[in-house]
Image (spheres, rainbow, N blue to C red):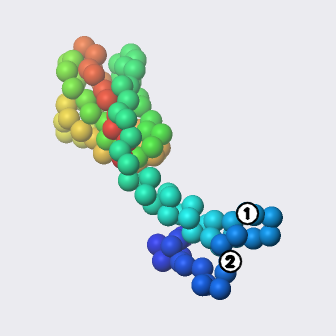
Amino acid sequence: MSLLARFAMTRNQTPLVAAGGLAQKDWYIFFYNLYLAVTEGLPQQETSITVTTSPMTYTAVIRGQAHISGGAVSVIEFSRDGTNWYDTGITAGFVQMDKGDRLRVTYSSAPIITYFPM
């Protein structure tokens, strides 16, 4: 849905409340989209990722950034499909991820991995 369509105003002749005391559908959709626009930008709490055996794979459930620190990491790889893996060229730091992206971390001493939703 386009941004313009998402926030299209209803006609000024459309009553706010329908028979039965409920909000008209057009007004409900407008206020619901306004609520989503305001709350989508709020920061969400970071999450500690449980580090499993090496190499471990984490799949992002929401868009955000994974932060890898500490331990003895030898390689951090990134994949969109779980088949094609790309070396990030770093052994610590932030990796940007979209929902469904995968991160594979190979290590000899477990790192700390924290996920920051966006």
Q: Position of residue 14 (x, y in %)?
A: 67, 81
Task: List the residue tagged with mark 2.
Answer: 15
Residue 85 visible, this orientation = no
Q: Position of residue 5 (x, y in %)?
A: 53, 76
Alpha carbon distance from label 1 to label 2: 11 Å
Three-letter amino acid code of the residue under disc 1? Leu
Q: Position of residue 61 (x, y in %)?
A: 48, 39
Q: Residue at x 33, y 38 (%)?
A: 116
Task: List the residue tagged with mark 1.
Answer: 22
Q: Is residue 33 left or right of residue 85?
A: right
Q: Position of residue 75 (x, y in %)?
A: 24, 29
Q: Nearest the camera: 99 or 12?
A: 12
Q: Is residue 17 left or right of residue 31?
A: right
The total of numbered circles placed on residues is: 2
SS at mark 2 in the image: loop
Q: Nearest the camera: 44 or 63?
A: 44
Q: Residue at x 36, y 25 (%)?
A: 48
Three-letter amino acid code of the residue under disc 2? Pro
Asked if labels 2 and 1 touch by Cβ distance under 8 angstroms, the answer is no
**Disc 2 packing (10 Å; few <14; some 14–19; many ≥20):** few
Q: Residue at x 38, y 30 (%)?
A: 47
